[in-house]
């Protein structure tokens, strides 16, 4: 006799219970707090009984002189991270896929994965030590080569490069896992046929490997475009100082400064919601373009 569906698949539901609880508790329940964006919050009255202000906070943010600079900084940093950080995991995965020595392959994987597990605080501390004006290794090498020491964290034009390239070093190895998994499913018959036809390694990669994982690349690109505006708060805030604020002030740090430190919860919620809406628009545009020009899309 066939068991009911609920008891037949109880292992699956037990496995999914914790992730579902995490999503509900930390992602869906907090959505109720978005009403703060339309409220003049009063702690005594509570969220839902505070007076409504409509779109006042959104207009206030867009009318402030610094809003355009903050949005531009956020988009520039996110786009730079996408432009540099997206191809590197693919390149790393393709290179590792061509390695025949298992020992060398596993060693490289371990070395490239390890930085991902370094905490943000430790990462920024390492950057400050490496690029310190007086005692940093980088400046010592520059001076030894006859150059002048550079205050890397004090130059606004260098902030984005420090942020993005350190992020590539930290995250490229971990991000390559999904592409390595996709490459493992490439049919070996295609590679063997390419070898018989006399294709070089580069041509096998270009005409066999990359087309086979193209759908995975496009899917990841859509998600990454949607996350351009969602730059993490911690790293930028830790790297921020009065000398580079003109380029390092982004939406997430602005929300922290105005909302948590300034106590203006309604205004900061509105700015955060505005950022999320921008991300949604970018995601929908990327998905629509992918659907139009390729066979791959989220839906």
Image (cartoon, helix red, strand yellow):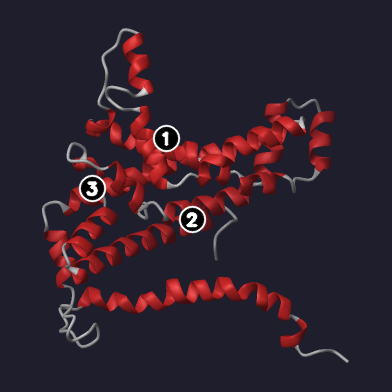
Assign the C terminus to one quadrant of the image: bottom right
Residues packed near mark 1 inside 10 Å, few (<14), some (14 to 19) or many (20 plus): some
> Looking at this view, is 44 or 112 the one in front?
44
Q: Position of residue 31 (x, y in %)?
A: 37, 75
Marks 1 and 3, the one that precedes in the sequence:
1
Q: Is mark 1 on a helix, strand or loop?
A: helix
The reply, left or right, for residue 143 in relation to residue 39 is right
The reply, left or right, for residue 90 in relation to residue 268 is right
Assign the N terminus to one quadrant of the image: bottom right
Residue drawn at x 61%, y 51% as measured from the top left: 216
Spatial separation of the CA atoms under disc 2 and disc 3: 24 Å
Marks 1 and 2, the one that precedes in the sequence:
1
Mark 2 vs mark 3: give the one in front.
3
Q: Mark 2 points at which residue?
A: 223
Circles 2 and 3: CB distance less than 8 Å?
no
Relative to 50, does residue 229 appear above or below in the rendering? above
Q: Mark 3 points at which residue?
A: 249
Residue drawn at x 27%, y 18% as measured from the top left: 149
Q: Residue 201 carries which label?
A: none
Spatial separation of the CA atoms under disc 1 and disc 2: 20 Å
Q: What element carries label 2?
A: helix
Relative to 244, does residue 6 appear above or below in the rendering? below
Residue 241 seen: yes
Relative to 80, does residue 288 appear above or below in the rendering? below
Q: Mark 1 points at which residue?
A: 165
Residues packed near mark 2 inside 10 Å, few (<14), some (14 to 19) or many (20 plus): some
Circles 1 and 2: CB distance less than 8 Å?
no
Farthest residue to the right: give it.
1
Q: Where is residue 20 in the image (x, y as percent from the top left)?
A: 55, 74
Q: Position of residue 140 (x, y in %)?
A: 34, 17
Q: Where is residue 174 in the image (x, y as percent from the top left)?
A: 57, 45
Mark 1 vs mark 2: give the one in front.
1
């Amino acid at each position: 006799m066939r068991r009911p569906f609920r008891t037949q698949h109880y292992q699956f539901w037990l496995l999914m219970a914790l992730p579902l609880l995490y999503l509900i508790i930390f992602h869906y329940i907090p959505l109720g707090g978005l009403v703060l964006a339309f409220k003049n919050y009063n702690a005594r009255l509570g969220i839902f009984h505070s007076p409504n202000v409509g779109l006042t906070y959104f207009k206030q943010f867009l009318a402030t002189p610094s809003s355009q600079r903050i949005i531009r900084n956020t988009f520039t940093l996110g786009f730079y991270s996408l432009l540099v950080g997206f191809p590197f995991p693919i390149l790393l995965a393709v290179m590792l896929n061509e390695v025949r020595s298992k020992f060398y392959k596993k060693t490289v994987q371990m070395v490239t994965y390890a930085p991902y597990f370094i905490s943000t605080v430790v990462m920024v501390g390492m950057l400050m030590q490496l690029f310190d004006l007086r005692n940093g290794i980088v400046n010592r090498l520059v001076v030894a080569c006859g150059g002048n020491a550079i205050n890397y964290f004090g130059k606004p034009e260098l902030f984005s490069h420090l942020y993005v390239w350190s992020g590539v070093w930290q995250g490229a190895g971990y991000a390559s896992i999904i592409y390595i998994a996709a490459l493992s499913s490439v049919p070996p018959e295609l590679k063997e046929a390419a070898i018989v036809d006399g294709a070089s390694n580069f041509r096998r990669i270009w005409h066999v490997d990359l087309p086979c994982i193209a759908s995975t690349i496009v899917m990841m690109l859509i998600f990454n475009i949607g996350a351009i505006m969602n730059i993490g708060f911690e790293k930028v805030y830790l790297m921020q100082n009065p000398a580079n604020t003109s380029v390092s002030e982004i939406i997430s740090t602005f929300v922290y400064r105005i909302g948590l430190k300034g106590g203006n919860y309604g205004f900061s919620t509105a700015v955060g919601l505005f950022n999320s809406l921008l991300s949604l628009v970018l995601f929908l545009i990327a998905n629509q373009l992918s659907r139009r020009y390729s066979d791959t899309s989220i839906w």
